Image (cartoon, grey):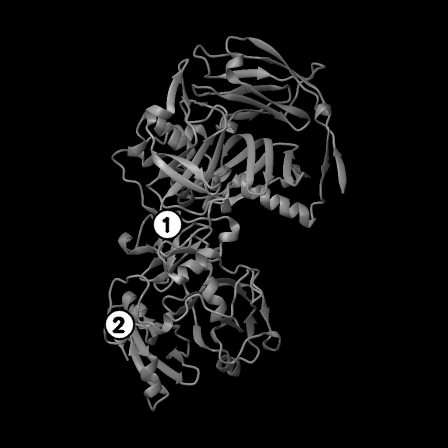
Amino acid sequence: MELRYFIGWTLIGLITFSLSPLWAQDLQGRLLDKNGAPISDAHIYISNTTIGTTTDQEGYFDLKSIPQGEHSLIMSHIAFMPLIQPLRDFENNEGQRIIMEDRVAETAEVTISSGKSNKRKRWLKSFNRVLLGITPFARSCEIENPSVILFWETDGALQAKAQDLIRIRNGALGYRIFFLLEHFRMEGREMQYAGKPLFEELSPTNDKERLRWEKNRETAHQGSREHFFRSLLAGNCEEEGFEIYHARLRQGNQFEVIGPARTANILKEVDGQMDLHFQGFLQVVFTKEKGVPSMATSSIGKAKSTLGRPAEKDMIDQEANQFRAVSDVQSSFLYLIKSEVGIDPSGRLKDPSTLKEYGYWTSEGLADLLPLEVENSSEPDKQKQPEPSLNGFTLSDLHIPLEEIYHGGPPRDGIPSIDHPVFHLPSSSDIRPRDQVLGVVYKGVAKAYPIRIMDWHEIVNDEFDGNKVVVTYCPLCGSGMSFEADINNQSRTFGVSGLLYNSDVLLYDRETESLWSQIKSQAVSGPESGTMLKLVPTYFTTWGEWEKRHPTSLVLSSQTGFDRDYSHSPYNSYEWDQQLMFPVSKESEILKRKDKVIGVTVNGKHKAYPIKSLNKSDQSTWQDVLGDKKLSLIYDASSEVLIVTDRGGQVVPSTTMYWFAWYAFHPDTEVF
């Protein structure tokens, strides 16, 4: 459907100001239209702050405690063209008449798809990605009024306007952002947008959420553009963790570092203000946090595995088509379109459009933006040691040793979880009898998850008769475990963090960004640290044997929505090679590293049942005692499944995995 975008009003605003003795402290005024009628419900705010209000029924507004510095005053109403004006224009003026241009002059033909059209959905997805960014915090952001955004294409470039302030809820940092969109253009991998935000504090539901927001705000500030520019002005870049280098673009797609850059050579004072000036590119490296995925705005080379392990390279290359890169540090490149640009004391560029960015900072959008008040209160506390972070996760309240957490290679979600699984009946599936599967029966529903799919995804966020369950598999440990996903009365969805502990996958939940150890079945970092997961019985077997016991079992489809070759494993011969990719804290030579065992835990006591020993036994049933609990065991050699029940007939969960993994987590284990 085609609409002609046409809005034509003229606003004449008569504003009278009453200033406190110290300029830029308080500001009062009244907004009127050209006929002298008051304009109510207009947004009046100081850009990049939490200082904002709306006009009352008589058009009056009152802004309090405006900070010192150069700021923009924003006036916005859905019926009129917005006004952006330097606050200094109102200094020493008791009243000023402001005329706003008629929007007739901006008539443009805009192709707008209906709200349900696939084209608009694609455009809105791209818009969100650019405006909000792709950092972990972006996942907790939502545009609450997307209908105000208008899209059109010009010569292959996607452009956008907004009929009103865009309202964004940031659940990661605890803000609602009202964003005046001034400009948006996206052409291929080149992206540009500009606007003026107002921040509104959200009310936390509890102390845990308040503390999470505080930690996330500190994380967002560390390594940000504003943090860098303020460090540059203060002359303490190295102390704050920034390294600066001159660089150039070689052969059109590869940045080449020339040498270190001196602050004195890239900053100069002009008429009492500081200007940034340099030729070519600046590389800015932040060394205090690990790198995370970034959006590319230039044809920078694809990510490569620096460790050279085939499994890691395969997993990293999965994300190459999404312009993502992985690094041990946060590396960004800056390019000045003009010869220089001013920087105000708060670390904000006076004309951001004169600077182009590449690399890590392009992954940050409004999701990581903080108001000036928070940034100005974020001066580093020399006595306080910042919490460590890896792969974009802040490691707080750790329940495992920091030095034993390893970066596995892929970024967070570089191994994508399956969040909307599709299942087939056996007759409609391409599964073969000898295919290995994880079998789960829960709430009377049986499902099978082929290992050849789990190798590529590791996590399936699923439901059994309306009950949330997360099914997990770690190829490095050979461990398949499932857990109830309703935790503390909140449903959780899980992703792959890209981090490992004892060679085992660390999951993370997207609601609190806590890290969870699969084999420990416990949160080991973040707001939920120490919380235990409730196991759901999961069996490692073949499809042929599983189908015999559960002929109506559903089978996870290979139609996952991801382009993966499920006919081969990215881990090749890992199962048969006794070498480990990552170190573990403890090892035992009682069994070979990758002998399969079935592990059982009862009342804090652990026991391993080696499958080789079970297969050699003449018995198939046993009575055992573990953790002062009497157990009945039934073993089926054909399926290599061990069913463990207590005296009441309740199933006790057991887990199949490699011996090295079981022992690393349970060095006090008994062995059958």
Task: Answer left or right for 61 relative to 603.
Answer: right
Q: Residue furthest bottom?
A: 618
Quadrant for the C terminus, please.
bottom left
Q: Using the rendered view, name the quadrant where residue 541 is placed.
A: bottom left
Q: Position of residue 140 (x, y in %)?
A: 50, 45
The residue under label 1 is: 526
Residue 42 visible, this angle: no
Quadrant for the N terminus, please.
top right
Task: Answer left or right for 561 relative to 272.
Answer: right
Task: Answer left or right for 557 relative to 80.
Answer: left
Q: Using the rendered view, name the quadrant where residue 345 is placed.
A: top left
In the rendered view, would you say 17 is above or below 377?
above
Q: Residue furthest front?
A: 251
Disc 1 residue type? Gly
Residue 669's label in the rendered image is 2
Of residues 282 and 391, the one nearer the viewer is: 282
Which secondary structure, mark 2? Answer: loop
Q: Residue at x 26, y 33 (%)?
A: 382
Residue 233's label in the rendered image is none
Which secondary structure, mark 1? Answer: loop
Of residues 161 and 328, the one nearer the viewer is: 328
Q: Position of residue 53 (x, y in %)?
A: 55, 25
In the rendered view, would you say 405 is above or below 203?
below
Q: Residue at x 25, y 35 (%)?
A: 383
Q: Position of residue 194 (x, y in %)?
A: 55, 31
Disc 2 residue type? Thr
Q: Position of residue 634 (x, y in %)?
A: 39, 84
Residue 171 visible, this angle: yes
Q: Using the rendered view, name the quadrant where residue 277 is placed.
A: top left
Gap between marks 1 and 2, in whole Å? 28 Å
In the rendered view, would you say 416 is above or below 231?
below
Q: Are marks 1 and 2 in contact (CB under 8 Å)?
A: no
